[in-house]
């Protein structure tokens, strides 16, 4: 029956695994990369695309044969030959590195990506194995958050300044005598307003730092 098409062998702890035949191991590696969730492609030092998995095809909007006919400069609008040479200098020096960049999908639509690149060399063949992740939505949400923090912080500052000034004038007796209990309550109010002011300033500072 269909249930007997495959037999599952469960390996017990301590059992020595029999190495897979090289052709099967190679096919499994190819299958795993091909079906991986993260987009990936291989590119040689001249910038030619040598391989792309299904996730990369979907992310970039190209078919497999289309991608294999392109070079890295067609996918990266900000990449110049000089920058590409610098990329390889870094890759050869460190073996791998990560950075944020812009890629271009089919139709010329650019989108921001996080890139992780790894150097591969065997038998005189050198490749950069590039994994990338679309961060457009992440950047959009970050921008909304930053705008919200900035707007709220600025909108809070003006009424806080007015309230503090009014409370301060009453606290100092400029509008008539007040009792000690009233002075104590107003003093606590001033402390609370100052604390809130520091929080607003911290929010603005964080927003500026993250914006660079």
Image (cartoon, rainbow, N blue to C red):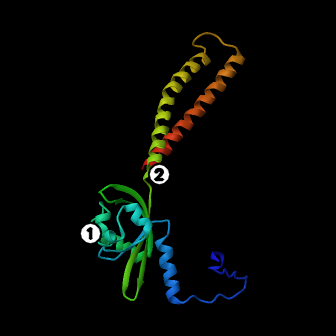
Q: Nearer the viewer, mark 1 or mark 2?
A: 2
Pointer 1 or 2: first along the chain: 1
- Which quarter shows the N terminus? bottom right
Q: Nearer the viewer, residue 73 or 145?
A: 73
Please give the label number shown on residue 138: 2
Relative side of 13 to 112, left or right:
right
The percent position of residue 117, horizontal first and vertical second, equals 43, 70
At a point 48% along the width and 30% down the height, the residue shown is 155
Examine the image and state in which quarter residue 71 appears. Answer: bottom left
Q: How many residues crowd mark 1 within 10 Å: few (<14), some (14–19), many (20+)?
A: few
At a point 52% along the width and 84% down the height, the residue shown is 25
Relative side of 126 to 36, left or right:
left
Q: Nearer the viewer, residue 2 or 189?
A: 2
Q: Answer whether residue 209 is visible to the viewer in this image.
A: no
Please give the label number shown on residue 169: none
Q: Which residue is mark 1?
A: 81
Assign a secondary structure to mark 1.
helix
Relative side of 71 to 202, left or right:
left
The percent position of residue 103, horizontal first and vertical second, equals 35, 60
Q: How many residues crowd mark 2 within 10 Å: few (<14), some (14–19), many (20+)?
A: few
């Amino acid at each position: 029956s269909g249930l007997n098409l495959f037999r599952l062998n469960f390996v017990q702890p301590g059992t020595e695994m029999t190495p897979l035949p090289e052709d099967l191991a190679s096919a499994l590696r190819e299958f795993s990369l091909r079906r991986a969730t993260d987009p990936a492609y291989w590119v040689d030092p001249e910038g030619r695309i040598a391989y792309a998995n299904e996730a990369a095809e979907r992310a970039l909007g190209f078919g497999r044969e289309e991608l294999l006919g392109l070079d890295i400069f067609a996918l990266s609008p900000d990449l110049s030959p000089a920058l590409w040479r610098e990329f390889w200098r870094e890759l050869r020096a460190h073996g791998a590195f990560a950075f944020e960049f812009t890629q271009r999908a089919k139709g010329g639509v650019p989108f921001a990506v996080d890139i992780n690149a790894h150097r591969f060399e065997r038998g005189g063949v050198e490749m950069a194995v590039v994994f990338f992740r679309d961060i457009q939505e992440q950047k959009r949400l970050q921008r909304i958050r930053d705008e919200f923090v900035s707007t709220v912080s600025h909108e809070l500052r003006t009424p806080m300044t007015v309230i503090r000034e009014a409370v301060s004038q009453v606290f100092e007796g400029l509008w008539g005598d007040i009792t000690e209990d009233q002075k104590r309550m107003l003093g606590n109010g001033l402390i609370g307003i100052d604390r809130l002011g520091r929080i607003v300033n911290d929010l603005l500072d964080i927003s500026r730092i993250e914006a660079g």
